[in-house]
Amino acid sequence: MKTFTSLLKLAPALLVAALATPVFAQGNLANPAALKETAPEVYKARFETSKGVFVIEARREWAPAGADRFYNLVKNGFFDNARFFRVVTGFMVQFGINGDPAIQKSWRTAGIKDDPVRASNKRGNVTFATAGPNTRTTQVFINFKDNESLNAQGFAPFGQVISGMNIVDGLHAGYGEGAPNGRGPDQSRIQAEGNAYLNRDFPQLDFIRKATIER
């Protein structure tokens, strides 16, 4: 049997890189303060999902703080393997809770300041969820229809789906609204238990295989 030492001698650079990369990536995601890169003025994010591919185009002129946060989350793999946990037909689809509770815990209080509402919550526009002033963290939603009533409530879109809206429309909506108002997932349990809870109790939820910034 080859020992660790002999393997290291055979391919030291390869082995060290393989061992180091996962730790580095997880370290980035567990430290929101380190992910503060300013996004390009306009950029595209490609989402490969269990239903197919859709692309979001983000614009800093619409909501700079929101566009920057989304850019950093996508670029560092935060959304990979995350579920579309709240899909309400005729309203919107919500995602953005990491499947690993240890990573998600780091982001629960990592709020960003509110952006003025410069674009409307029209069909296909993408917006951060909020629980009050300056509480946007990682959860975003895509409008299924024109939800202009959300504008006055301070929900500031930062981008729009420019291709694959049919994929978004087709995401599994069978569970409906989340608990306690519906029979869908309980957000507090997703935060605490991650994908283990969703896989067990809500196995039909669609999910993001990988999200990347398009070059």
Image (cartoon, helix red, strand yellow):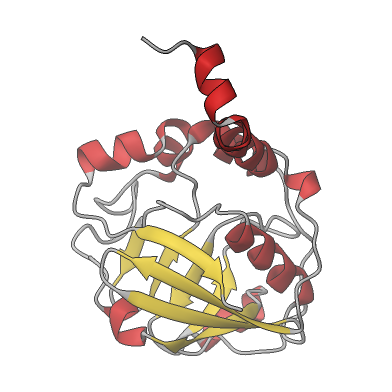
Specify the quadrant of the image occupied by residue 187.
Answer: top left
Residue shown at the point (60%, 55%) measured from the top left = 138
Q: On the picture, is 143 further left or further right than 28? A: left
In the picture, the quarter occupied by the C terminus is bottom right
The answer to which of 33 and 4 lies nearer the viewer is 4
The answer to which of 38 and 105 lies nearer the viewer is 38
Image vertical order of residue 68 relative to residue 108, above or below? below
Residue shown at the point (37%, 43%) measured from the top left = 186
Specify the quadrant of the image occupied by residue 208.
Answer: bottom left
Residue shown at the point (33%, 58%) measured from the top left = 207
Location of residue 35 in the rendering, given as x and y in whole percent from the top left corner: 75, 52
Q: On the picture, is 124 further left or further right than 83? A: right
Count of number-bearing discs: 0
Q: Is residue 108 visible?
A: no
Location of residue 55 in the rendering, given as x and y in whole percent from the top left corner: 47, 80
Location of residue 63 in the rendering, given as x and y in whole percent from the top left corner: 73, 78
Image vertical order of residue 1 relative to residue 102, above or below? above
Q: Is residue 174 visible?
A: yes
In the picture, the quarter occupied by the N terminus is top left
Location of residue 183 in the rendering, given as x and y in whole percent from the top left corner: 24, 50
Image vertical order of residue 52 relative to residue 178, above or below? below
Residue shown at the point (75%, 81%) measured from the top left = 60
The answer to which of 133 and 38 lies nearer the viewer is 38
Image vertical order of residue 176 relative to residue 145, above or below? above
